[in-house]
Amino acid sequence: MLLALLLVSGCGTQTPPATPNGPETDPEQEDVQAQQPPQTQESQQEGNTLKISVGGYELLATFEENASAEAFIELLSQGPLTVEMADYGGFEKVGPLGTTLPRSDTQITTQPGDVILYQGSQITIYYGTNTWNFTRLARIDDPSGLGEKLGAGTVSVTFSLA
């Protein structure tokens, strides 16, 4: 989806070649430009994308719309946060945030790629499923091969704003 958005935004910024009588206009291109909002793609995504760095991989995730995610964004706006995360139950990596965030717990079944706040002070990345009262902070955009990317045992995971 991100690639498609970048392609669309790239289409609207190209300048047609000039001719001896001035630049040519392409009505189709003018329509695309007219539909584009004045903000750039980067400014639209700023603050809405979580970057997760682990074992040489960079994963992008989209934040949920809740008070907990907003508090997490505020925490990350102070700089990247590195958490030592360990496997638990064969379906998640979990580690301490070092602070407590407000909870917005609801009964959910997690999916691979869910970034979850647990008990207000633990952050969890799910590579399997589990049902419990959790607060979803974000969802990894492409969770394919997530278990392998997270690796086995304890790993350092860095969370930052993209």
Image (tube, rainbow, N blue to C red):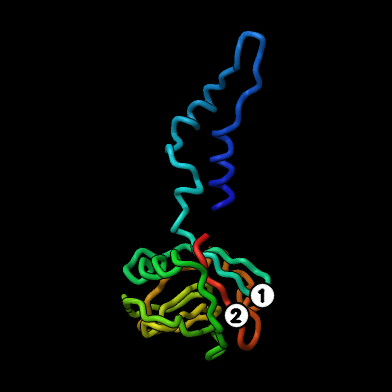
Disc 2 residue type? Ser
Q: Nearer the viewer, residue 158 or 89?
A: 158
Residue 59 picture location, percent across and down: 58, 66
Q: Which residue extends farthest front?
A: 78
In-image side of 57 versus 31 (left or right): right
Which residue type does callout 1 highlight? Gly
Quadrant of residue 68 within the rendered picture:
bottom left
Relative to 12, residue 71 above or below: below
Which of the labelled discs sits on residue 1, or is there none?
none
Q: Which residue is mark 1?
A: 55
Residue in the image at 45% along x and 49% along y: 44
Q: Going by the picture, which residue comes out furthest to the bottom?
A: 89
Q: Is 17 positioned to the left or the right of 45 in the image?
A: right
Q: CA distance from mark 1 to mark 2?
A: 8 Å
Where is residue 154 shown, x and y percent of the image? Answer: 61, 87
Against 160, residue 20 (above or below) is above
Q: Secondary structure at mark 1?
A: loop
**Classed neighbour count for the residue bearing mark 1: other residues with Cα under 10 Å, few (<14), some (14–19), many (≥20):** few
- In the picture, the disc for residue 156 is 2
The mark that comes first in sequence, 1 or 2, is: 1
